[in-house]
């Protein structure tokens, strides 16, 4: 444990950053005029969305890389990114309604951004399910890689189709974050939170990859033992 | 244990050359750094217990499996790139018939003949149907065929494109008298015309009949190589039993 | 390549003509979906007209899943997939052949379903019929493009065909939205479908290409 200097540093940084974010979010940032304190959830809601998207971008990049050259580590990174991406995506979907209800009176509106997040969640949960139901590691890696590429290419299409659909059938309630018209302290808080969540992502990624490596090592040792027996 | 590459190899390059083949399925290693050379025109029989890697080897040589470490060269071309011309040379027979039960006898052969680019297709198909004794059934759906008939049709399917390299995976398993007879005929003919054959089998007697060389796979490598022409079947069986006993 | 496409298409259509399994399953299922909507929703005529396009495509989507499943299920018997792996043809050609076969199969179901839909929901489908047919084709191609690829994957998983809709439906959200909006226009709505038609074309081109390029990875071991 102590040997993983880099990892410990990363976790430490994340912790410090998280403390700063918590302070800024709850104590330092000014209260929003119309929505009140509930608006503070925005500082967690929006960065979660960006990090989820970044995670899925990584899935795409490493899936593509795996299809070009079959490096198992790249498959591991894709899988880990997908898991963490789904995690942050879930956070967006949970914080969304929690914010929406007190702020606008409804739990859910089929608002463009939230709907996009929901569809993304479905795509990548399906990705994880595919992995779960494929026992052969090589085949699993190949199939996941193809799905990882296909799924991400779909994202802009999903975004445009939902956005245009929403403008054709506008909803009375406007949800989602207002990133325009942000006062400087709010912007600062948002950026700090974004930084924190990004660090958190990399920390989780590192831990998850380490776990995978340990699992593989354990399997190898077990195999060797079984053979000499 | 370690393979013994025969010193009596022909001077020209072998038709099939497998180098350091390693294939894993997750945690199970099917082939361990296996190397094997097969000269053109040789009839090679591969024996060994279940899980020794025989079928995996055959699947790699047939270009069905393409993810492995090591190289396999067929006629000088790497099978990982397996271009169409190379694949066209390969014929594959297994206990699965690879036939579509909702197509007729003729349509099944037509499908494969088209895919392999067989010239003078209709004549070839008629010839094949006659050869395996299915003339009366050529417009019958495969689902309505008896087991023996299906087996014969499967043989026809495998040979319709006149492969020069024949790969067989336990081909005699469950074959009836008539189908076995046809297969034996075809193998003998193949040998006469200097085609290359690699047969995986559990049936040592049948495997010995036409073989030039017999190779024993054990735990993913070549455990033993025997020239069938210089050894007696009995002596080989003793040796084989000894290897399996370990 | 052309040989691969036409031969696969010929084979799949011939098998389907023989068994009619994909057609009957998807047609009956799609029909059931439409009927169930009527039971569960008990709509007035105006409501039915407004939502008709949506119901139609839900029916098509679920029926389509059945048709797509059949496409590779028939290769599972006697390990015919191995036959596909052996034959010396371009993998992309096999994909295109299957994709076209699936598209035709789904279109046949849809076209037969249309008049029934018109009757059940009291909707005039002839008003902008060419447009309606165009949407049908573009939407079905979109569905089938990714569907064929994913169906090939699904066959090799432990959950077999059950995982196909789970993987496919989220990815085809753009197709479903666009097809429904464009169909609404074709059925008489006062909207502008040009964006949706463009989106369908773009989706089709992108995903046929991507699936064509990656299909080899799915087929090969």
Image: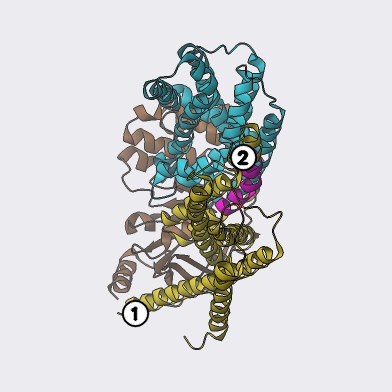
Chain colours: A yellow, B brown, C cyan
Q: Chain of mark 2?
A: A
Whether labels 1 and 2 share one chain = yes
Q: Quadrant of residue C120?
A: top left
Q: Residue at x 65, y 40 (%)?
A: A163
**Cα gap from disc 1 to disc 2, whole angstroms:** 55 Å
Residue A162 marker: 2
| Foreground of the two, B77 or B100 | B100
Is A148 contained in the magenta span? yes
How crowded pointer 2 is (Cα within 10 Å; few <14, some 14-19, many 20+) is rated as many
The single residue placed furthest to the bottom in the displayed view is A2
Residue C145 lies, with reference to residue B50, above or below; the image says above
The single residue placed furthest to the front in the displayed view is A33
Q: Chain of mark 1?
A: A
* Position of residue C207 measured from the top left corner of the image (x, y, whole percent): 64, 41
**Count of number-bearing discs:** 2
| Foreground of the two, B58 or A159 | A159
Query: Circle 2 — which element?
Result: helix
* Residue B186 visible in image: no
* Position of residue A106 measured from the top left corner of the image (x, y, whole percent): 49, 43
Query: Could you tell me what secondary structure mostly forms the magenta stretch?
Result: helix
Which range is magenta?
A146-162
Where is mark 1, residue-wise?
A: A225
Residue A205 lies, with reference to residue B119, above or below; the image says below
Q: Residue at x 51, y 63 (%)?
A: A84
How crowded pointer 1 is (Cα within 10 Å; few <14, some 14-19, many 20+) is rated as few
Residue A154 marker: none
């Amino acid at each position: 444990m102590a040997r993983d200097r880099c990892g410990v540093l990363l976790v430490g940084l994340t912790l410090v950053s998280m403390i700063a974010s918590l302070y800024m979010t709850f104590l330092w940032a000014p209260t929003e005029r119309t929505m009140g304190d509930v608006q503070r959830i925005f500082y967690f809601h929006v960065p979660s969305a960006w990090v989820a998207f970044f995670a899925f971008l990584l899935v795409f990049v490493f899936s593509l890389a795996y299809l070009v050259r079959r490096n198992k580590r790249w498959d591991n990174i894709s899988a880990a990114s997908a898991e963490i991406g789904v995690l942050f995506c879930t956070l967006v979907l949970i914080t969304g309604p929690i914010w929406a209800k007190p702020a606008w009176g409804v739990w859910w509106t089929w608002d463009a951004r939230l709907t996009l997040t929901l569809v993304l969640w479905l795509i990548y949960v399906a990705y994880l399910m595919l992995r779960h139901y494929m026992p052969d590691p090589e085949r699993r890696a190949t199939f996941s890689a193809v799905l990882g590429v296909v799924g991400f290419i779909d994202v802009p299409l999903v975004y445009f189709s939902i956005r245009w659909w929403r403008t054709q059938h506008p909803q009375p309630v406007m949800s989602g974050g207002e990133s325009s018209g942000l006062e400087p302290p709010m912007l600062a808080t948002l950026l700090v939170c974004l930084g924190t969540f990004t660090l958190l992502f990399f920390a989780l990624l590192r831990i998850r990859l380490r776990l995978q490596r340990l699992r593989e090592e354990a399997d190898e040792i077990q195999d060797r033992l079984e053979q000499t027996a | 244990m370690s393979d013994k590459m025969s010193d009596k190899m022909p001077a020209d390059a072998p038709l099939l050359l497998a180098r350091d083949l390693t294939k894993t399925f997750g945690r199970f290693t099917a082939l361990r750094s296996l190397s094997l050379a097969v000269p053109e025109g040789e009839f090679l029989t591969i024996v060994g217990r279940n899980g020794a890697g025989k079928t995996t080897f055959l699947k790699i040589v047939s270009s069905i499996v393409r993810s492995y470490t090591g190289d396999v060269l067929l006629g000088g071309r790497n099978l990982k790139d397996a271009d169409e011309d190379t694949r066209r040379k390969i014929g594959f027979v297994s206990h699965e018939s690879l036939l579509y039960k909702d197509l007729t006898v003729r349509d099944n052969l037509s499908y494969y003949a088209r895919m392999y680019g067989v010239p003078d297709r209709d004549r070839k198909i008629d010839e094949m149907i006659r050869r395996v004794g299915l003339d009366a059934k050529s417009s019958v759906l495969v689902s309505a065929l008896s087991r023996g008939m299906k087996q014969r049709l499967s043989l026809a399917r495998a040979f319709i494109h006149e492969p020069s390299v024949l790969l067989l995976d336990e081909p005699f398993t469950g074959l009836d008298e008539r189908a076995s007879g046809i297969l034996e005929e075809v193998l003998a003919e193949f040998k006469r015309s200097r085609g290359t054959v690699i047969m995986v089998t559990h049936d040592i007697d049948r495997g010995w009949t036409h073989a030039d060389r017999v190779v024993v796979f054990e735990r993913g490598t070549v455990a033993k190589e025997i020239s069938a022409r210089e050894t007696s079947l009995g002596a080989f069986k003793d040796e084989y039993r000894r290897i399996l006993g370990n | 390549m052309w040989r691969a496409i036409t031969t696969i298409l010929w084979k799949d259509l011939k098998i389907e003509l023989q068994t009619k399994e994909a057609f009957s399953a998807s047609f009956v299922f799609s029909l059931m979906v439409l009927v169930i909507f009527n039971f569960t929703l008990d709509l007035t005529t105006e409501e039915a007209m407004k939502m008709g396009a949506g119901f139609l495509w839900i029916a098509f989507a679920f029926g389509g899943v059945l048709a797509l499943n059949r496409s590779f299920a028939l290769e599972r018997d006697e390990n015919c997939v191995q036959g596909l792996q052996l034959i010396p043809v371009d993998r992309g050609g096999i994909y295109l052949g299957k994709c076209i076969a699936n598209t035709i199969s789904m279109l046949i179901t849809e076209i037969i379903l249309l008049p029934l839909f018109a009757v059940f929901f009291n909707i005039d489908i002839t008003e902008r019929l060419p447009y309606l047919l165009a949407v049908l084709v573009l939407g079905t191609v979109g569905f089938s493009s990714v569907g064929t690829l994913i169906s090939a994957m699904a066959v090799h998983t432990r959950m077999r065909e059950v995982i196909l809709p789970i993987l496919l439906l989220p990815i085809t959200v753009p197709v479903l939205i666009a097809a429904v909006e464009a169909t609404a226009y074709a059925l008489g709505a006062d909207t502008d479908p040009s964006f949706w038609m463009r989106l369908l074309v773009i989706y089709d081109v992108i995903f046929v290409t991507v699936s064509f390029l990656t299909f080899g990875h799915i087929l090969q071991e």
